[in-house]
Amino acid sequence: MKLGVAAGATAATIVGASVPITGMLEGYPVLTGQAMRYLLGAAVLLLVARRLPMPSWRDIPPLLGVVASGMLGFNAVLLAAQQYAEPGFVAAVMGGAPIALALLSRQRTTAAIVGAMVVAAGIVLLSGGGTWHGPGLALALLTMVGEVCFTLFAVGVVKRLGVLGVATWTCLLAAAIGAVVGTFVGGWQVPDTRQTFALVLLAVVVTALAFGLWYFAVNRLGPDRAGVLIGLMPVSGLVTSVLLGAQHFTLVSAVGAVTVALGCVIGLRKRPEPHADSPSDARLQETAVAT
């Protein structure tokens, strides 16, 4: 369990800290930029995995679900949402993702649900709320759905293809789809030095490394308990912003970070182990069989 928690926490921290890096791609074609990022990420994963398991026909729908909703769709909707809503509002709405994962998990526990609610409250405190207009609320809700789908669609297929298999195939599919669609929507553009740096960093660290770590955590912990670790993303983003001088550290943000940490502790409690049959139960069963 400890290894799963460490992997999930590291993945969430990486993604949260990458927000300033993503901002370096402002104005760059979204889909073709993602196509390049995911292709490079897939290349790195292939070097690590060496062998790539072939998906069966039943694996294709969930893999495409991850790509369409949790990768290409998520990034596109996130950028659109920030045109109609403040980043704090979008982050606050996305705070519902741990709750959704806890409720939708097949092996959900009360501890995971309570922990997810506490994490969501901490995210709202960290983000400061914010306002929206027009389709801002709908787009923010879609970003939350994308965040949830990125995890849920992969739960079953990770058990069949493995962590590296799912991460690699989703990156390959995202690169192919992004390249085709992006050719007609947004077009291609040669990145400058700053954009190239951002794309390489996002591909190697945020995609190849963080994707693998996150799916490892989901496989070990289950989507309900792994979901509470999503709360570490805004905490990491806050720390990065403070270190870069882009944001001040306030008492409210400190309370929010502590609340998120408390929610993670609650949500990551071990599931109760099934009780072994007592000697008296065993004797009763033997008597029932004998009669």
Image (spheres, helix red, strand yellow):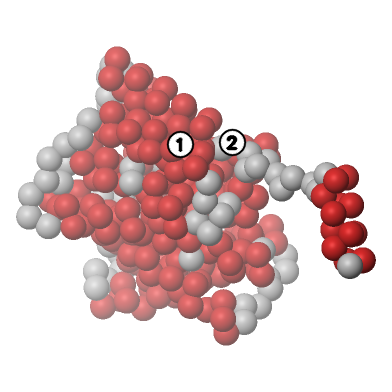
Residue type at tag 1: Gly
The residue tagged 2 is 269
Q: Please name the residue shown 56% across and 81% down the image.
A: 58
* SS for callout 2: loop
**Front position in the image: 273 or 88:** 273
The residue depicted at 18 percent of the width and 57 percent of the height is 138
Residue 113 lies, in percent from the top left, at 45, 43
Position in image of residue 87 (x %, y %): 22, 41
Mark 1: few/some/many CA within 10 Å (<14, 14-19, 20+): many
Rendered view: 92 above or below 125: below
The answer to whether residue 85 is left or right of residue 40 is left
Circles 1, 2 touching at the beta carbon (< 8 Å): yes
* Residue at the front extreme, as displayed: 291
Label 2: how many Cα within 10 Å (few below 14, some 14–19, many 20+): some
Give the residue at the far top of this rendering.
Answer: 251
- The quadrant the N terminus occupies is top right
Q: Label 2 amino acid?
A: Arg
Label for residue 115?
Answer: 1
Note whether residue 38 is visible. no
